[in-house]
Image: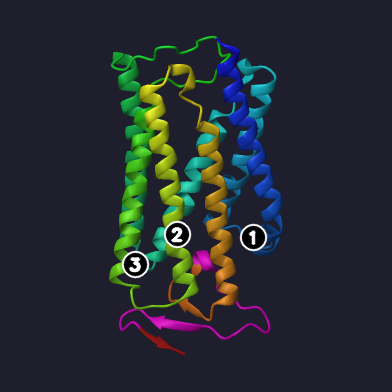
Amino acid sequence: MSATTIGYQTAQIVGAMAAVVFDYCLTIPQEVQLIWGRKWDVIRVSFTLTRYATLMGTAMTTYAAVTDRSNYRSVRLHLISIIAAEGLLIFRTYAFWSQSKKLLVFLLIFAGFSIAGAVGVSEVVSILRLINSPGYDPTGCVFGSGRRSAIQYSFLILYELVLMILTIYKRLNFYKGIRSRLVSTLYRDGMIYMTCITMVSFANIIIALVVPGTYTNILDAPQLVIHGVLASRILFNLRQSRESDSIIIDRIFPLADTRRSPGSRSVVFVNINSRTVEG
């Protein structure tokens, strides 16, 4: 396999590692202030898996890229990080929909079907050899997953689009007349996150279908970093907005963590049924 191919992959992996370490150094004070010392609930577990599986997975991939690529063992960490990041986005959407239990059940079931579909369809395609992977390197010198990775990214895009549609619908039909930094943060961060993931996933599909098979994982590490970094920042921004906004939307407690510290301003609730502010 050409040194150019290996060089391209090494460069993007090392670049992704540099980005995640730089972001970690920038945001560790926020993590200490907003996350540490809180109770271990589903949100904190998802956050911890997202943040540290991304860091460890990228570090292991970088180590394998610059030493012995046959020892590449970080695929599971990549999957854990991405699934945990999607979990944070699910709970963000759940909070934006006023903790609708029906919506949460739908999102979890749909997530299960998406994961099963991505894995199942990929395996069927692989067994039937419906998609060839010209240029795929079986020696392990170059990271590559073949053309079937396009199927997996397609299911990811589908799930992100569903979350995006749900977010836009709720924003236009429920929160349209409400001015709150918390609501704006939930909406803005969610849209930025889903747009970035959709764009990178679409780029991965194009790469998987068009370029030689040895380049199919060229954006794998960057996508992992984008998932982890943006998902973590969603939670940081959400909890920071709670500190500076006196209007908290009723029943968005799990993510915003509305416990007041001494000297903080009073909390004002929005009546969900009448859409009026009550104090």
Q: Residue 92 shows which numbered tag?
A: 2
Rendered position, 273 above or below 241: below
92 lies above or below 226: below
- Point 71% across, 59% down: residue: 29
Quarter assignment of residue 97: bottom left
Q: Which residue is mark 1?
A: 35
The image shows residue 18 at horizontal and vertical percentages of: 67, 39
Q: Which residue is mark 3?
A: 171
Percent position of residue 101, x then y: 35, 62
Q: Marks 2 and 3, how far apart in space? A: 13 Å
- Tell me the mark number nearer the camera, choosing from 3 and 1: 3
Q: Are marks 2 and 1 in contact (CB under 8 Å)?
A: no
Identify the image quadrant of residue 264.
bottom right
Q: Secondary structure at mark 1?
A: loop
Whether residue 98 sits left or right of residue 80 in the image: it is: left
**How far apart are the alpha carbons under marks 2 and 1?**
16 Å
Does residue 269 show up magenta in the picture? yes
Instruction: Name the foreground residue: 12 vs 31.
Output: 12
